[in-house]
Image: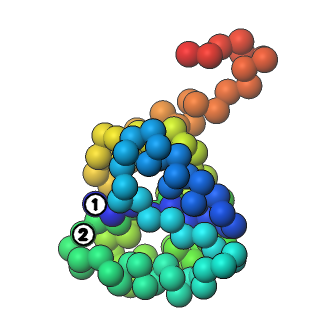
Amino acid sequence: MQYIIATHGQLAAGYENTVEMLTHFEKLHAICAYGEENFPENLVRLLDSFDEEEQILLFADLLGGSVCQEAVSLMDAYPNLHVIAGMNLALVLEVIISGLEPGKLDEAVEHARDQIVNIKKNQRLS
């Protein structure tokens, strides 16, 4: 399984750095769109570097955003590409640490949604 984080600006690099710091996982690929990198050319180049049979999970920052739209437009050309939009750190960590296969991602997405809480209103930290 290959993991990609693709975001507007430098957010992907920050996620890559944080995931590596917390987990020592070093096989996360960051695509920082519309900054110094040539997007979507660098995304296509990265996808082409993977084995044809390998599953690829791409985390995108915004559902409906241009980064996500570009990734989704590539799914026909890369049938093993799976895109999750609206990522958060809890989701990325759970998927990477547990090594979830694409067929089991829905449960991780639900867990990640549970991590978004207005603490003042709900007064919970657990």
Residue 108 in view, yes or no:
no
Residue 29: assigned label: none
Give coordinates of residue 27: x percent, y percent. 35, 59
Quadrant the C terminus occupies: top right
Mark 1 to mark 2 CA distance (whole Å)? 6 Å
- Position of residue 6 measured from the top left corner of the image (x, y, whole percent): 55, 66
Residue at 62% from the left image edge and 64% from the top image edge: 7
Residue 92 image offset from top left, x and y in percent = 47, 47
Query: In front here: 82 or 91?
Result: 91
Quick check: 54 left or right of 121? left
Residue at x-position 57% and y-position 36%: 113
Protein image colouring: rainbow
Above or below, 94 relative to 3: above
Q: Amino acid at mark 2?
A: Glu
The residue beneath circle 1 is: 1
Of mark 1 and mark 2, the one earlier in the sequence is 1
The residue closer to the viewer here, 122 or 6, is 6
The residue where tag 2 is placed is 54
Label 2: element kind: loop
Q: Quadrant of residue 121?
A: top right
Residue 45 location (% of width, % of height): 43, 85
| Cβ–Cβ under 8 Å for marks 1 and 2 | yes
Quarter of the figure that contains the N terminus: bottom left
Query: Where is residue 23, by image quadrant?
Result: top left
Relative placement, left or right, of 66 versus 70 is right
Residue at coordinates 41% horizontally, 79% vertically from top-left?
A: 46
